[in-house]
Amino acid sequence: CLVDSKSYLNKCLGTGYPNYIFYKLEYILWKDRVGICEEKGLNLEKWNKFRLIAKNSVEHIFPQHQKEENKHIHYLSEEELTDCNLNEQHPIDDFGNLVLISPGMNSEYSNMPYKQKKGKYDSKTEIDSLKSDLIFKNGDWNWKLAQEHKNEMIVLLEKYINKLKTK
């Protein structure tokens, strides 16, 4: 599935994505951390301290189920939903909206809206995942940003795979 990462990661599989894809991406991000942190204005010292540990819970950054008081916060518009043409798949399950974290952290984030999750994340001294750090640098979160993030991750994966092919 990584050989054709663009096609595969555009499927909106939610928790159906294998954990190894997230692990491989974390490795690639960490390996390219100097350039990524410089380009994105992220804390290189935190990225240098990051250690990949066993995690097995897929978190939806924009929650799957919103609390009643947060129903006014929209991930995408009706027009965007119509334009998605995802064949019965839901855009909330898009790879760009997902990160792999510990089950405890997933429970802590629960169905919080993005800004609350970001507040919790920003108050930590350590990074949950490098993919999370890239996502939580945004002031807000929606379908368009999730798409941009996913596309950036696909480019990194494809670049990594192409390097392996030339060796």
Image (tube, rainbow, N blue to C red):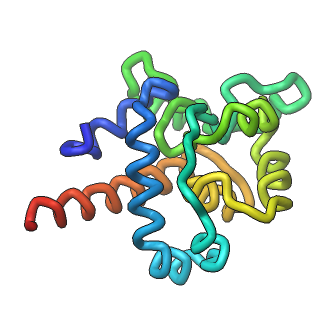
Q: Is residue 154 left or right of residue 165?
A: right
Q: Residue at x 28, y 45 (%)?
A: 6
Depicted 12 relative to depicted 37: above or below? above
Q: Is residue 14 above or below residue 55?
A: above
Q: Position of residue 166 (x, y in %)?
A: 8, 66
| 60 horizontally vs 140: left or right | left
Camera-side residue of 120 and 105: 105
The C terminus lies in which quarter of the figure? bottom left
Quadrant housing residue 27: bottom left
Residue 131 at x, y percent in the picture: 55, 55
Location of residue 138 with respect to 73 vertically, above or below:
below
Q: Position of residue 142 (x, y in %)?
A: 63, 46
Horizontal and vertical percent position of residue 51: 57, 59
In front of the other: 134 or 25:
25
**Which residue ends up furthest to the right in the rendered image?**
69
Tell me the residue at 77%/30% (across/down): 107
Horizontal arrangement in the rendering, residue 79 relative to residue 74 (left or right): left
Residue shown at 41%/53% (left/top)? 25
Give the position of the N terminus as an image quadrant.
top left
